[in-house]
Image: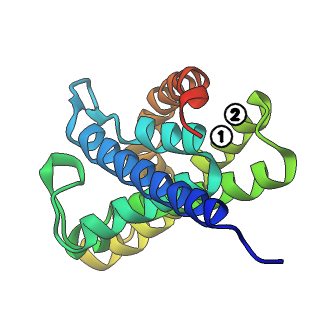
Amino acid sequence: MEKTAAQSVGKSKWSTFDMAYIGVFAVLMAICSWISIPTLVPFTLQTFAIFAALGVLGGRRGTFAIVVYILLGAIGVPVFAGFSGGIGILLSNTGGYIIGFLFSGLLYWGITKIAGEKPVVMMVSMLLGMAAYYVFGTVWFMQVYARQTGAIGLGTALGWCVIPFIIPDLCKMVLALAFSKVLKHHVR
């Protein structure tokens, strides 16, 4: 069956909107990475933007926004925390958490594709995604840290890299879900 000109134009407009939304959320991730909240252990709003991208854009476009964000950082654009960028950041001991965001997006995409985007499914997908970047990032951290400084135990790595961030990340996830619920109607 041949496509009409209107169908072709509609399809290309959709692709343009997809790219625009992906770009906007990649920029949101960068901006949120630069916002540091000073507490006993300072944290950024980076994970809020990751969860918001997935919640608003859905698994496919949200994951592509994460890929764009990581690639921008890899080529040296200062999109990571502290206005940093470059492949060296991704290869550093905390780079595994950034790469882990990709696994979080893929997991969210897979789960929501199978189970739909009901709020409870979105929340469970985000929780599992959070576990994915914590696991990948912590294993990465332990490997890189061992090569640079010396081996550390899992408890120490969790105490430095995971436990202080669980409550803030859960709060950011809840805020991102609320943000997604409000904004999702406007993003098609």
Q: Is residue 21 above or below residue 153?
A: above
Is 151 on the left-hand or right-hand side of 121?
A: left
Image coordinates for residue 22, horizontal then vertical, percent:
43, 53
Residue at 43 percent across and 51 percent down: it is: 156
- Circles 1 and 2 in contact, beta carbons < 8 Å: yes
- Marker disc for residue 103: none
The residue furthest front is 5
Q: Is residue 135 visible?
A: no
Q: Secondary structure at mark 1?
A: helix
Examine the image and state in which quarter residue 56 appears: top right
Tell me the quarter of the image containing the C terminus. Answer: top right
Is 158 on the left-hand or right-hand side of 135?
A: left
Cα–Cα gap, marks 1 and 2: 6 Å
Tell me the quarter of the image containing the N terminus. Answer: bottom right
Image coordinates for residue 164, horizontal then vertical, percent:
42, 34
Q: Is residue 70 above or below residue 17?
A: below
Q: Nearer the viewer, mark 1 or mark 2?
A: 2
What amino acid type is highlighted by mark number 2?
Answer: Met
Q: Is residue 66 above or below residue 126?
A: below
Is 138 on the left-hand or right-hand side of 77?
A: right
Residue at 40 percent across and 52 percent down: it is: 20
Which residue is labeled 2 in the image? Answer: 123
Residue at 21 percent across and 25 percent down: it is: 38
Image coordinates for residue 177, horizontal then vertical, percent:
59, 27
What amino acid type is highlighted by mark number 1?
Answer: Leu
Which residue is labeled 1 in the image? Answer: 127
Q: Nearer the viewer, residue 78 or 128?
A: 78
